[in-house]
Image (spheres, rainbow, N blue to C red):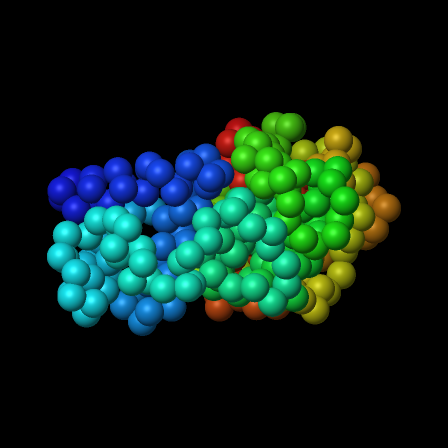
Amino acid sequence: MMHRPGHIKLAAALAVGAFLAAPPAHATGRPAVAALQVTLRHHHVYRGPVDGVVGVRTTTAVMRFQRRHGLTADGVVGPKTRRAFGRFARHVLGSRPLTPGLAGWDVAELQFALAWHGFPSGAIDGGFGRHTERALIKFQRWAHLTPDGVTGPGTFRALRTPLPRCPIALAWPLQATVGSPFGPRGTGFHPGIDLPAPAGTPVGAAAPGRVVFAAYDPSGYGKLVEVAHGDGVISMYAHLSALSVHVGQSVGTGRRVGRVGSTGEATGPHLHFEVRLRGAAVDPVPALH
Ligand SMILES: [Zn+2]
């Protein structure tokens, strides 16, 4: 893609001043940009993904908003544009404690940062509802903070730490190209990777371990196998058509745990492969060999 001046200007504007309180950039997106995208959606000028990446759709939406509010349509989020965003955009992450019931730019930043730290909370929409509260409490417990569901300096600090990574090497559960990666998807967050394969394709354990779950999961995973590998690492194999193991069984790398299917919330046959570290979803790709 060509770099247009608008991209650079917007990126520069987001990098300074009021945005310093935001957590650092992640590999594929920044919380402040995600919050901007949520704000633009809130103002009905943007329908693109909340991915934290400044692209042509985000810049175009900023310019559309500026034209509607009689501002210079330069795609730069300066003080005037920010003021025109209204109350929703007044607070940046870290400038006030966040509690259930609040809404705004900083809540969107929180939701985006929580998701990247392994605790997605449904739609990233800037509204601090039950899902966000649950995700925050899980994260606080994970980060050894008081799990009170209210963000304070400790939570903001913890959200600025590097993202958790899978500490063990993993084998591919089946040979396929990643169809949908770990990360933002639409207004939500995909906590694993999708490996498209024909129904019935054998699925192998990614590392040696013990089966801790092998049953139908009603929350959307469908037929699901979970294998614990020690060090707090659990691998998950979802949407299976058949289970090949039982709880308590020890498995070696590559041992068949089930077969590809489309049970649960799946539109077609694929393996949803997810890895958790002490409950936090982590991108499995850097650990796959
Ligand atoms: Zn998936």
Q: Is residue 262 visible?
A: no
Task: Give the image quarter of residue 14.
Answer: top left
Q: Of all residues shown, which one is farthest toward the right?
A: 248
Task: List x then y, in percent, for residue 62.
Answer: 24, 58
Q: Nearer the viewer, residue 65 or 260?
A: 65
At x 72% / y 65%, what residue is drawn? 216
- The answer to whether residue 231 is left or right of residue 43 is right
Q: Nearer the viewer, residue 229 or 109?
A: 109
Task: List x then y, in percent, for residue 130.
Answer: 65, 66
Asked if residue 251 is positioned above or below residue 91 in the image, the reply reads above
At x 33% / y 37%, what residue is drawn? 16
Task: Give the image quarter of residue 155.
Answer: top right
Task: List x then y, in percent, for residue 103.
Answer: 51, 64
Q: Is residue 111 visible?
A: yes
- The answer to whether residue 158 is left or right of residue 179 is right
Task: List x then y, in percent, for residue 207.
Answer: 68, 34
Asked if residue 162 is positioned above or below residue 210 in the image, the reply reads above
At x 52% / y 56%, what residue is drawn? 107
